Image (cartoon, rainbow, N blue to C red):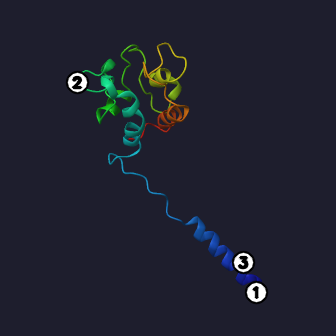
C-alpha cells in the first residue's frame, strides 16, 4: 500500500512540474513594449503635443512604433553623450533620470503629475530585462 501511495505522489509531483509555460506575446506582435507604450508612455508622455506629432519634443516620439527606435540606444537630445535607454542598465539610462526624482534636468512629464512609482518601476524593469519589444 505504501508503494502505491509513493508512486501516485511521484506522478502528481511530475505532473505539477510539467505544466506548460505561460504564453508570452510573440516579438513584434504587440508584446511587452507595445503594452508599455499604450499603458504608460502614450497617456503620460505623448499627449498634448509633447512627445508626439510631427515635431515631438526633443525628437522623441513616444506615441507609436517609432518609440522603440527613438528610445533604445538613442542619444538623448539634451545630453548626446548619454543614451536614452541603455539595455539592461536602468541606472545609466537617461530616461530613468528624467522620470525619477533627481537627475540633471527637470523631472518629466513637465507640467503634469509625475509618473507613479509603479510606472517608473515598470520602465526600470523593462530596461533591466533587456528592452524586449
Q: Are marks 1 and 3 in contact (CB under 8 Å)?
A: no
Residue shown at 36% from the left, 24% from the top: 74
Q: Residue at x 41, y 24 (%)?
A: 84
Reply above or below: 40 against 81: below
Density class for disc 2 (Cα within 10 Å; few <14, some 14-19, many ≥20) is few
Residue 73 x, y percent position in the rendering: 38, 27
Secondary structure type for disc 3: helix
Question: Circle 1 — which element?
Answer: loop
| Place of residue 6 in the rendered image (x, y in percent of width and height, measured from the top left) | 72, 78
How far is the residue under mark 1 from the one under mark 3? 9 Å
Rounded to the nearest whole Å, what is the CA distance between mark 2 and mark 3?
Answer: 68 Å
Circle on res. 117 = none
Q: Is mark 2 on a helix, strand or loop?
A: loop
Q: What residue is at 37 percent from the left and 20 percent from the top?
A: 75
Alpha carbon distance from label 1 to label 2: 76 Å
Of circles 1 and 2, the one toward us is 2
Q: Mark 1 points at which residue?
A: 1
Residue 70, percent from left and from top:
33, 27
Q: Earlier in the sequence, mark 1 or mark 2?
A: 1
Question: Residue 107: percent from the left, percent from the top?
Answer: 48, 18
Q: Residue at x 34, y 33 (%)?
A: 68
Tell me the number on the disc at residue 6. 3
Residue placed furthest toward the right: 2
Q: Label 3: few (<14), some or many (≥20) within 10 Å?
A: few
Q: Would you say the residues marked 2 and 3 are in contact, meaning their CB atoms lie under 8 Å apart?
A: no
N-term-proximal mark, 2 vs 3: 3
Q: On the image, numbered disc 2 is attached to which residue?
A: 54
Work out whether 73 lies above or below 7.
above
> Which quadrant is the C terminus positioned in?
top left
Between circles 2 and 3, the one closer to the viewer is: 2
User: For residue 94, what is the image quadrant?
Assistant: top left
Instruction: Specify the farthest residue to the left.
Output: 54
Amino acid at each position: 500500500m505504501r508503494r502505491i501511495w509513493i508512486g501516485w505522489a511521484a506522478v502528481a509531483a511530475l505532473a505539477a512540474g510539467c505544466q506548460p509555460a505561460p504564453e508570452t506575446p510573440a516579438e513584434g506582435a504587440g508584446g511587452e513594449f507595445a503594452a508599455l507604450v499604450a499603458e504608460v508612455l502614450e497617456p503620460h508622455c505623448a499627449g498634448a503635443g509633447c512627445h508626439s506629432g510631427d515635431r515631438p519634443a526633443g525628437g522623441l516620439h513616444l506615441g507609436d512604433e517609432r518609440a522603440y527606435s527613438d528610445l533604445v540606444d538613442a542619444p538623448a537630445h539634451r545630453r548626446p553623450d548619454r543614451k536614452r535607454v541603455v539595455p539592461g542598465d536602468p541606472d545609466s539610462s537617461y530616461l530613468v533620470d528624467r522620470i525619477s526624482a533627481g537627475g540633471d534636468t527637470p523631472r518629466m512629464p513637465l507640467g503634469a503629475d509625475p509618473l507613479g512609482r509603479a510606472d517608473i518601476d515598470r520602465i526600470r524593469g523593462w530596461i533591466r530585462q533587456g528592452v524586449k519589444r
